[in-house]
Image (cartoon, rainbow, N blue to C red):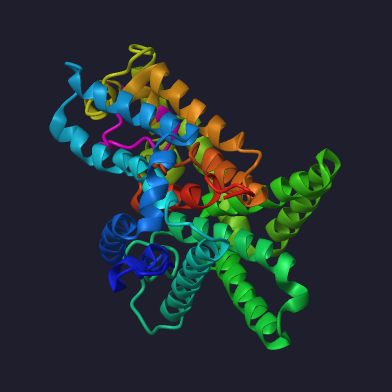
Amino acid sequence: MGVGLSFLQRINPAWFLAGAAFFLPIKPAPVNLLLMLTLVFVLVNPQTRNRLPGLFKHPITVAAYALVAWLVFTLSFDTSNFDSASDYLSKYLRLLLLPILAAVFLTKQDGTTVFDAFCVGVFVSVLGSYAVALGFFPWPEGSESPLLFKLHITHNFFIALATGYVAYRLQSVWSQTHLAIKALVLLALGLALYNFFFMVEGRSGWVAMAVLPVVIAYQRIGLKGSIIAAFAVMLILLAMYFGSDFFNTRVNAVFTEVQQWIDGQAIAQETSNGRRLSFWLHSIEAFVQAPWFGYGMGGFEAAVTPHAQASGFTFAFNNPHNQYLLFAVQGGVVALALYMVFIAMVLLRNNSQHLLLLHGFVLAYVLLNLLNSFHYDFAEGVFFVLGLAALAYRTEES
């Protein structure tokens, strides 16, 4: 990586970032340590350090920093409590890492190394799930799914993203890949997809998996391709619905729980989808009373609690499981607009070296943030920053 450099200066920060990507689907503690080492060696390595000034001026960086600046400014609101805000603040500040992590990706191989490491980590989590199902580890208390590391939402969402990446990689290197490697990769994919659809109840991941083929088809073939892909996905889902009791039961549970909530049944407070609908309702009620600027980063819980209590909803919450509603209550229309500008700046990167991956990756987050608050969640939030740093900043010329 350079002539006349010291040993430390020759160390590639991508190695540490690959380690962080590997542990993301498994355990958070090594991730934080490896991210710190990545930041240190970005500054130590002259090639990555020299990229920083340009990356800090990048339109995506400017848009991300504007969003963070507004959310930090809302801490000054009278309705915002700093103790309540501290948890959100640490999550949103991750966006500040974008240009620093983007400096890591000096070559195409750096990106490949990091994403390959993530996929290996995902497969380790899949093997852990099988180990729980086979009785080698205890079943997680209160869970319907055999999970060793992450909750079902994260587990299945990461499988969906890893599957999309592996499919993208395979189509470009298939003809040059040794038969034994092909067989191993296909076996790993088969095990992961069986675990995804028939063992773990992560319905958010199912949604992501259904959307990714449509995005890929649109990029490759156009509107006609996306329509064909959507029809094919629908047929596959229908076949799974009528052919798999596991899939059928969990899809039916959504409709049952939604109907219970609509009917005002007390049991709705105890169901996943019933609670989520109450989270959304009371967040919207709070938002309409302070729509433009919100209640501040630390004002969410105090804003929604009176509405929840008025309806008899007794489950305290500081996360509506909808990133847009979380931003709306905390920072109002201003926060939502800044977030939309940020996402638009990413999607308009038409000269990205990895446009297909970038669009699929970002749209998966855009869609799933309707059902979750991925910028508040640790693993999903970190991988969003890591993925954008790898995909959105690189161009054909860089």
Residue 193: which quarter of the image? bottom right
Left or right: 124, with 100 as reference point: right
* Residue 310 is inside the magenta segment: yes
Q: Position of residue 88 (x, y in %)?
A: 27, 38
Would residue 45 be found to the left or right of residue 366 on screen?
A: left
Residue 207, x across and y down, in percent:
60, 48
Q: Residue at x 65, y 41 (%)?
A: 351
Q: Position of residue 20 (x, y in %)?
A: 37, 64
Q: Is residue 380 visible?
A: no
From this viewpoint, which residue is outermost toward the front?
4
* Observer able to see residue 218: yes
Q: Residue at x 30, y 31 (%)?
A: 313
Point 32% across, 23% down: residue: 70
**Closer to the camera, 167 or 273?**
167
Which of the image's four quarters has the N terminus? bottom left
Q: Residue furthest bottom?
A: 180
Quarter of the figure with residue 374: top left
Does the magenta stretch mainly form a helix, a strand or a loop? loop
Seen in the picture, residue 158 relative to 56 is either above or below; the reply is below
Q: Position of residue 96 (x, y in %)?
A: 34, 40
Vertical position of residue 38 compared to residue 55: above or below: below
In depth, the one of 396 and 388 nearer the eye is 396
Between 27 and 64, the one lying in front of the other is 64
| Observer-nearest of 163 and 289 | 163
Q: Residue at x 47, y 77 (%)?
A: 127
Left or right, 165 with respect to 158, comes to right
Q: Which residues are magenta?
A: 309-325
Q: Number of labelled discs?
A: 0
Residue 286 falls within the magenta-colored stretch = no
